[in-house]
Amino acid sequence: RVPPGDWELILDLTIQACDGLAHAHRYGVVHRDVKPANLLLREDGGLCVTDFGLVKMTGAEETPVTVAREPLPEKLEEGVSLELAPKPGTEWSSWTLTRTGALLGTPEYSAPEQWEGRGVAVQADIYALGVLLFELCCGRRPFDDGTKRTEPSLLIARHMSKDPPNPREFRPDLPKNLDTVILQCLAKRPKERPPSMLDLRERLTFLYRTVVGKTYPRPIPKPGVQRAAALNNKAVSFWNLGKSQEAFGAWREASKLDALHPETVYNRSVLQWRLGQIRSTEVLHRLAQVKTAYPRAGVFLGLYYLEQFDPQAAEVELNTALELPHVASEGLAWRALGDSRMYQARFPEAMQAYQAALRQIPDDHEALVRADLASRKERGREGKILFPSDSPLPVVVQGEAITALAFCPEGGLVAAIGDGLERISPEGHRQWRWQMSLLEGQGKSIRRLAVAENLVVSLESAGGRVWSLDRGRSLLALDERERFFALLDGGHRALAGLIELRRLTLPEGTPEVVFAGHTKRVTSVAFTSDQSKFLSGSWDTTLRLWDTASGECLQVFEGHTDLVEAVGVTPDGALGLSGGRDRSLRFWSLATGGCLWVRPSAGEVRSIDFCSAGRHAVVGYGRPGEAGGVELWDVSTGDRLFHREGGLVG
């Protein structure tokens, strides 16, 4: 806490804030949200400016930007938030306002031009620091005393039109000329304020020498680039070890030393984006800021454009960055350039880029693999597409809904379009169409399609059906309420049914094994990776674990209080997940049948899937016809990592 009257400490902290903001201004970055919560005080007395969530490039237009703010942690390993000593009964609170997704600032501290929509330059930060210096000296801000909440609109009006009081009215013992400096910082017109943070620093260090009787001891700090790089490397190591909290902590510390360190900003921002904490526009906004200070950061912009599947934009950024000699000596940039060209099927040019990468890093395995693909003009290996085409398949469908798609092994696709099924060639031509009869089409639609062994099968769709892939001839149709749940044995068999499930041969439909036990409709099934067992969920509120070969029921899971709509099984077959209309997600041990955790979902659970080799569960929730969303869960702990609202649930 900083009590009023400790002039040496007050001047020291303000000068350090000048140094931190001057570093950002040197790279054209305006903070726009200077306030106590964004100044962190280390145990050694050092002060760091943090939370550049409102940063704006000098000269940039005031266009709306969507920003998802990460809250400051309550505790920091090496620093604590700067706090002012409040008077008894004082309520210290400030909040940040938004306009069409654009963060404007904090009403207690922000400059008049931020609320008027005028251009914002470094003088906006000087104004906010002047408010903070007034508060440090007087124990209150110029336009509110903090004893009660003041409406933001009233605060903004005061900043825009009311002259600030002389701080000497509240602190008659204020050092000589300090009130003059404060009031200059609080001038309504930006041109009447000190021209830069360095100029303000000179004025404050002169006052420090006058008040304290000695020269200000701290030199202007140099950017801590090398230390930031070391902390970034430490963070990456933590992340690779699965220690995400420690990783983000190291990145926060690196940002204190250099808020624009390219690798730190890229790694932290992209991971926050993948976790759903910020939007893609915010990632691009941050990387563009870094690029003004470090032109080589164009490489990271290119990498992010590749992750967004925009190879043309990636190529532009990478080519620009590679004009810099120190970037041209890095294999990573050349490999990324090759990737951007692979997406565009420009194989000879991709080969040139990969060869350049290998000249820099001869043992780069990834570049070797990609160069081999480019030489053979192939987009993937071992059945995995590494570089899907950036050009859409030329299929034109007008006035009809596409409800399901499946890709054919030799190219092209099969699509459920309107009330029929069509096969489309790789060139976009219709090869055949199967038309659903008027009677069959009453209230029915194909929800999923699968292609295997020259067969097309409708999955999870009432009145399941099998067609021949070559001609579109209907080979097998289930009863109107029954459905196919999954293909088995490479498409030679399938699991089908309604209440009682059957393992059938395809395309004959001969039943081989019956799975009896549920008393109401089965809604979802999930198999182990080897398909030796599967879990089924039913409207009878139970789950059952089955032996696929024998039909034996191995476990019955009870606990849901309403209809079960979705089930999932981890790839290793150890855990099962279930959810439904009771808005709960249940984690089960498949070996013992015990319920490990029960967690509330944000809505009725409709789908469950796994990612990250089974470490995380992706859960879709919502009611048909209403807004739904998606959640990400940590399977090992039962913790929900984030959830995001989405579109309508079908």
Image: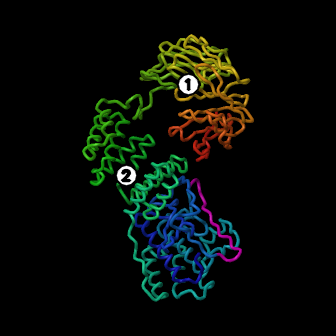
* Residue 428 falls inside the magenta stretch: no
Read off the residue under disc 1.
Answer: 532
- Total residue callouts: 2
Q: What's the residue type where badge 1 is placed?
A: Ser
Question: Mark 1 Cα within 10 Å, few/some/many (few <14, many 20+)?
Answer: few
Helix or strand or loop: what does disc 1 sit on? Answer: loop
Q: In the displayed structure, would residue 546 be above or below residue 86?
A: above
Q: Which of marks 2 and 1 is in front?
A: 1
Helix or strand or loop: what does disc 2 sit on? Answer: helix
Q: Position of residue 461 (x, y in %)?
A: 62, 23
Q: Which residue is drawn at 47% across and 85% down?
A: 207
Q: Residue at x 42, y 45 (%)?
A: 305
Q: Residue at x 64, y 37 (%)?
A: 588
In the image, 424: left or right of 374?
A: right
Q: What's the residue type where badge 2 is placed?
A: Gly
In the image, 52: left or right of 498?
A: left
Q: Would you say the magenta stretch is mainly helix, strand or loop? A: loop
Question: Mark 2 Cα within 10 Å, few/some/many (few <14, many 20+)?
Answer: many
Q: Where is residue 409 in the image (x, y as percent from the top left)?
A: 44, 22
Quarter assignment of residue 157: bottom right
* Magenta extent: 86-101
Q: Position of residue 420 (x, y in %)?
A: 57, 19
Q: In the displayed structure, would residue 492 be above or below residue 72?
A: above
Assign the C terminus to one quadrant of the image. top right
What is the distance, in whole Å, between disc 2 and disc 1 at their CAs? 49 Å
Q: In the displayed structure, would residue 238 be above or below residue 583?
A: below
Q: Residue 298 carries which label?
A: 2
Furthest residue in direction front, as rendered: 592
Q: Front-most of 623 and 228?
A: 228
Q: Which residue is drawn at 28% across and 44% down?
A: 357
* Residue 96 falls inside the magenta stretch: yes
In the image, 588: left or right of 300?
A: right
